[in-house]
Amino acid sequence: LFCILTTVNLLLPHGLGLYTVSSTYGDTIIMPCRLDVPQNLMFGKWKYEKPDGSPVFIAFRSSTKKSVQYDDVPEYKDRLSLSENYTLSISNARISDEKRFVCMLVTEDNVFEAPTIVKVFKQPSKPEIVSKAPFLETEQLKKLGDCISKDSYPEGNITWYRSGRVLQPLEGVVDIVFKKEMDPVTQLYTMTSSLEYKTTKADIQMPFTCSVTYYGPSGQKTVYSEQAVFDIYYPTEQVTLQVLPPRSAIKEGDNITLKCLGNGNPPPEEFFFYLPGQPEGIRSSNTYTLTDVRRNATGDYRCSLTDKKSMIASTTITVHYLDLSLNPSGEVTKQIGDALPVSCTISASRNATVVWMKDNTRLKSSPSFSSLQYQDAGNYVCETALQEVEGLKKRESLTLIVEGKPQIRMTKIIDPRGLSKTVICHVEGFPKPAIQWTITGSGSVINQTEESPYINGKYYSKIIISPEENVTLTCTAENQLERTVNSLNVSAISIPEHDEADVISDENREKVNDQAKLIVGIVVGLLLAALVAGVVYWLYMKKS
């Protein structure tokens, strides 16, 4: 048989060409024998060809004995199966199975061959971006990372993407280095692509990905990596200065914090702070605190980078203030009729509103006292505020006390029915005078009186009497300043009389009203009678 195989010409059926079987790594390779089985077939065989063209027989099947024999080829031990129709199966496909296999059908007078090309494919692992840079810096060509894909056959091709767009090599901007390594045992490839990239601020939050493109049994395919986003470092281009906490206005006593910010990444951690009138900066972190600010803190504040002082930011701070001076203030005691100038002086960073209150009641205008009265006494408050500045208010108070010696005015009211007479003693003075009634002559004190409320330094005391004879009532008013007395004659209830007009007291002297009038009338009458008698006597003597 061997002689026949080596000496007989090998023939192929007409029109039969090369046939390719594609298989996936690890699967079973199935190679049908693409020959029609002749009637006088003796046996069938499979072989493969080495690179130098020499054959290696691997399987034999007799057409008569129906037996199968496998050659002692180590790499195919326990991996071969030859069916009755001479289809050869190879389990657990390997890269080394990529060969030219030949199906041979042998008759007594001829040998027929049908070659099959075996292709084995292995899908690579999902690509992964490794050795990633912790950050990228603008204007610097820096390694971004490696894209690696393993266990591929044949080798794949790696492509880099920025936000879904392919990155092409560009000198000084994009540098891609590709390399592949084959495992000597498995003959599988590991592909690695290293990317150096010159980033810009436009790459902030931009995703980078890579892909591996490979060939499989069904053609070309592509697998993509997960996205990778890199922290982009870039220098500060602008500095801003903030005043914290944010507020519409700053007033004396506030605490404020200046915060300087750079728009670089990472942001600057130190700055120079320049206070009004101070050319030298104060090195600090990104904040500088001013406590209990005063009005002299008003001015322009600046901050700059420590390594680039020309990059500077500024802001103007106005510290609002409000001063109030009330003159006089506190507790002031004056006499009735005195003049009292009052001034409330305001000094403020803006126009301030002024409100006057007296005893918690708002006044329409500022108080002015040219002649103090008892009703002017009270608690005065001058209050001012800056409407634009929350919490900036000032107030001062004046407690005005108006004192006066007791003044008495007495009145008499007759009951129309003639049953009683009412005598009223009206008193003014501060501190509140005490009122006492007495009946002149007897000196007895009258306790059954009725008093009105004491308002604005005034009140009255009245008594109702029904005298059986003429009496004189005396009203005494006394406070810490002086004692004042006034009297009023009251006729007996049986004697008709009219209401008495008001009688004004003469300080520190007792006045007897009705009796004085009677005496004066008598004296005047006598004088008139004497004058008339003298004139009559003169005329009589002249005629005689």
Image (cartoon, grey):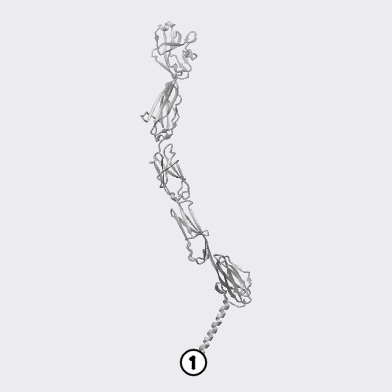
Question: Residue 468 placed where, x, y %?
Answer: 64, 76
Residue at image coords 61%, 69% = 449
Residue 94 in the image: above or below residue 473: above
Residue 108 seen: no
Q: Name the residue under label 1.
A: 542
* Pick the front one: 198 or 336: 336
User: Percent from the top left, x then y, of residue 407?
Assistant: 55, 69
In what element is the residue under mark 1? helix
Structural crowding at the residue carrying mark 1, measured as other residues with C-alpha within 10 Å and reported as few (<14), some (14–19) or many (≥20): few
494 relative position to 210: left or right: right
Q: Which of 76 and 159 is in front in this view?
A: 159
Q: Nearer the viewer, residue 242 or 281?
A: 281
Instruction: Using the image as rendered, state which of residue 511 and residue 271 is in the foreground.
Output: 271
Compared with 169, 283 (above or below) is below
209 horizontally vs 429: left or right: left
Quick check: 482 above or below 323?
below
Residue at 43 percent across and 39 percent down: it is: 270
* Circle count: 1
Query: Outermost residue toward the bottom?
Result: 544
**Residue 264 place in picture, x, y as percent:** 41, 38
Residue 48: image quadrant is top left
Vertical order, 458 against 170 (above or below)? below
Residue 3 placement: quadrant: top left
Amino acid under label 1?
Lys
Instruction: Give the residue at the far left of this rendering.
Output: 171
Name the quarter where the N terminus is drawn: top left
Answer yes or no: is residue 179 visible. yes
Image side of residue 216 versus residue 426, left or right: left
Q: Where is residue 251 in the image (x, y as percent from the top left)?
A: 46, 50
